[in-house]
Amino acid sequence: MTMSPVSTPADEAGDVHPHASRSLLGFGLALGILSAAGPLAVYLYLPALPEIARQLHAGERAVELSVTWYLVGLMAGQPVYGPLSDRFGRRPLLLSGLAIYIAGSIACAAATTIGGLVASRAIEGLGAGAAIAISPAVIRDMHTGHKAAQLLALRLLVVGVSPIAAPLIGAALMAAAPWTSIFWFAAAVGAAGLVATLLMPETRLAEARRATRLGRVAATYGKLVADTQFMAASFSVAAAQFVFTAYVSASSFVFIKLNHVAPWAYSLIFAVNAVSFVACAQLAPRLIKRMPPARLVRAAAAGQAIAGLVLLAETMSGTASTPALMAPLIVITGCYGLIGGPGTVLALQDHKAQAGTAAALLSSMQWAASALGSAAVAGFANGTALPMAASITLGGLAGCVAVRRLCVTTRLAP
């Protein structure tokens, strides 16, 4: 199987989508807002967890279940949204998902027991999965290659700001209003996504919708799993997500508790790494104009693995000071930005006819990897930075294996 290193003729000349001439900036930002609603609901209420536990007379473990069940709902809906959007169009499924997300957020705000909150969070996550699963398919409907990478980079720009802005917004809301205001804010973000969806055109062409048969969903998923290029690209993106989540889950403990960094200083450290991610995500479309996407993903995966090994060596040798940790972490988060967009382009490149199904499977793999990354550092916690460093290294090496297979598949072997 071969592919163009930068873009395909369909992307530049023939097979032009009727909405391909629309503003990349406007489309990318709209898709970013849609995709950010899901991650935003994870980070937004983290500052409120202790207060929620107190108000609802619940233990810490019970409150943390609201995070777990949100992620379960988010992952459960995506494999369903994708095929349905291939058959019935992107907008109806986006609108339905956002309506469920808004209803779930309002139910969270109205919850008076921890059981009600957990159930409402699962509903909220179920709705959030629609935008996360379908937005890459919207991009693939219109573009591939360089232009697709540009749209994905703009989407990641908005999504990448979520981990920085959401806890700050949540803390500000907590300072000014009850904890329920956080979920009213999430509902408002969902409403903004609803408006953005109404203003966007339907990108799934009518003839493609008519040609889709829901009875063949299992066969379509089977073909995707058997497609070496799709799976290798998807695994490379999922491995990078595993690495990033391991860092996010453990970094506050490592810097604040072990290295005695003040919370405000940790916020700056987190912001620096987030800037590295966002900057590299914006750089990726320019780079794939000059090199094949598979080669860029391979180089970034290697960079992530090497930086992980440096981090592991520092941790094991007892030299894991804050400046020493910062250098490899900046590389790790930057490489994550270089892998996400080009890796998604490579995964969806040959699946325009089933873009919704393919994007849903890709997204489900990412969120499953995210959950595994968080579970890895939590499950092996031993009071040191070793679980974070080891998890990051393991994910980086797994990404290198996946990318090597991707390079063989695309005849760009090293």
Image (spheres, rainbow, N blue to C red):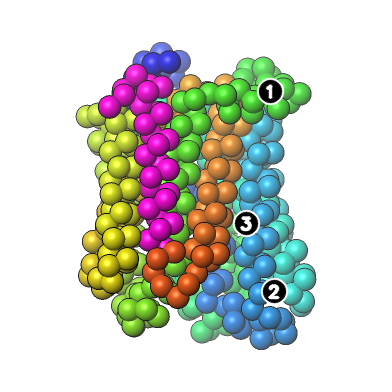
User: Main SS of the magenta segment?
Assistant: helix
Place of residue 66 in the rendered image (x, y in percent of width and height, measured from the top left): 66, 67
| Badge 1 density bin: few <14, some 14–19, many ≥20, Cα 10 Å | few
Q: Is residue 343 above or below residue 223?
A: below
Point out the tag, 2 or 3, that comes first from the N-terminus: 2
Q: Is residue 268 left or right of residue 198?
A: left
Q: Is label 3 in a helix, a strand or a loop?
A: helix
Q: Could you say which is closer to the camera, residue 136 or residue 27?
A: 136
- Looking at the rendering, the stretch of residues picked out in magenta corresponds to 388-414
Residue 186, quarter of picture: bottom right
Point out the tag, 3 or 1, that comes first from the N-terminus: 3
Q: Is label 2 in a helix, a strand or a loop?
A: helix
Q: Is label 1 in a helix, a strand or a loop?
A: helix
User: How many callouts does the rendering have?
Assistant: 3
Point out the tag, 2 or 1, that comes first from the N-terminus: 2
Place of residue 370 in the rendered image (x, y in percent of width and height, measured from the top left): 52, 53
At 62% across and 56% down in the image, what residue appears? 71
Q: Which mark is residue 62?
A: 2
Residue 252 shows in this picture: yes
- The amino acid type, in three-letter code, at marker 2 is Ala
- Residue lying furthest top in this view? 14
| Badge 2 density bin: few <14, some 14–19, many ≥20, Cα 10 Å | some
- The amino acid type, in three-letter code, at marker 3 is Leu
Query: Which residue is under mark 3?
Result: 71
At 57% across and 24% down in the image, what residue appears? 226
Q: Could you say which is closer to the camera, residue 241 or residue 389?
A: 389
Query: Which residue is under mark 1?
Result: 219
How far apart marks 2 and 1 lie (CA) works out to 39 Å
